[in-house]
């Protein structure tokens, strides 16, 4: 048992898919996993372990924002010997491309968070994806012949869904950032610290340039494709 996850050692698989929303974790377990069992309900941040194509996989909610994700990822790495975490989330597109419903696989994550500023003092650390997972996810996504485009590039993990200074986001766009979400930077940094693998895959749920949004039905459909891509990539690497 760890502080925020009520599982016994061995209850959690080496591969964990991590949506922000704990109800998405339940939906993934119910929709994709066989013999799924809930191992933790602490704070309503559900975690499940089951099998996919005969292989053990867990799904754990992270909550919103890097501080929340970091609690769960620290405990997964330190207490449960988890080897790979794949975030399956949503993001807001910051440039004309990507379009809503497209997939963004984050090769690296910029941030406005103070977490790494404090950890690295005056230095700037560059949090990046595990290359093996990134390549496997891109292979899995392109093999599926999706209606949606697949983009690989930088994302921006912001601490603010409602930023006090939105003009700063434009700076990120000037330097090639595609989309904004709230968790990947801490995930990549913690994986590096613990010598584990991490990847963030996001579907574009809303578009900051065009104002377009996805319907909840569309969201579920593209979210499902992303989950299968994450499962294929994660199990190809473990
Ligand atoms: N901002 C931050 N995180 C997000 C957004 C956004 O616009 N859309 C989906 N996740």
Image (tube, rainbow, N blue to C red):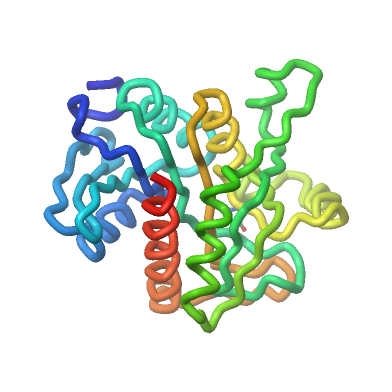
Along the line of sight, which residue is nearer the eye, 114 or 101?
101
Q: In this orientation, which residue lies closer to the viewer: 35 or 6?
A: 35
Image quarter in which the N terminus is found? top left
Front residue (pair 190, 24): 190
Q: Quadrant of ligand 1?
A: bottom right
- Residue at 40%, 47% (x, y): give it: 18
Identify the residue at image location x=48%, y=44%: 64
Left or right, 64 with reference to 114? left
| Percent of width and height locating residue 140 | 48, 66
Q: Quadrant of the C terminus?
A: top left
- Looking at the image, residue 133 sits to the left or right of residue 85; the answer is right
Residue 235 as seen in the image, left or right of residue 179? left
Q: Is residue 163 above or below residue 141?
A: above
Residue 3: percent from the left, percent from the top? 30, 20
Relative to 91, say whether 41 is above or below.
above
* Number of numbered markers: 0
- Of 10 and 168, which appears nearest the observer? 10
- Expressed as whole percent of the image width and height from the top left, the position of residue 206 reads 59, 68
Q: Residue at x 43, y 63 (%)?
A: 229
Residue found at the very far top of the displayed protein: 121
Residue at point 20% right, 30% down? Answer: 10
Quarter holding residue 97: bottom right
Q: Is residue 132 above or below residue 112?
A: below
């Amino acid at each position: 048992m760890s502080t925020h996850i009520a599982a016994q050692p061995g209850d959690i698989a080496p591969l964990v898919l991590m949506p922000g929303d704990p109800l998405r974790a339940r939906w993934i377990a119910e929709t994709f996993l066989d013999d799924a069992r809930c191992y933790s309900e602490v704070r309503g941040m559900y975690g499940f372990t089951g099998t996919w194509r005969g292989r053990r996989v867990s799904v754990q909610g992270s909550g919103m924002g890097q501080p929340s994700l970091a609690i769960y990822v620290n405990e997964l790495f330190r207490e449960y010997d988890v080897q790979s975490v794949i975030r399956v989330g949503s993001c807001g597109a910051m440039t004309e491309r990507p379009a809503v419903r497209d997939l963004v696989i984050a090769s690296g994550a910029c941030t406005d968070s103070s977490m790494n500023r404090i950890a690295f003092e005056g230095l700037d650390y560059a949090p990046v994806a595990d290359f093996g997972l990134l390549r496997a996810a891109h292979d899995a996504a392109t093999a599926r012949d999706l209606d949606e485009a697949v983009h690989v590039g930088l994302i921006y993990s912001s601490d603010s869904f409602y930023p006090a200074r939105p003009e700063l986001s434009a700076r990120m766009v000037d330097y090639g950032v595609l989309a904004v979400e709230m968790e990947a930077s801490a995930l990549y940094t913690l994986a590096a610290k613990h010598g584990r693998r991490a990847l963030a895959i996001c579907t574009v749920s809303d578009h900051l340039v065009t104002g377009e949004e996805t319907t909840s039905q569309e969201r579920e459909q593209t979210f499902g494709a992303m989950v299968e891509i994450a499962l294929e990539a994660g199990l190809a690497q473990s």
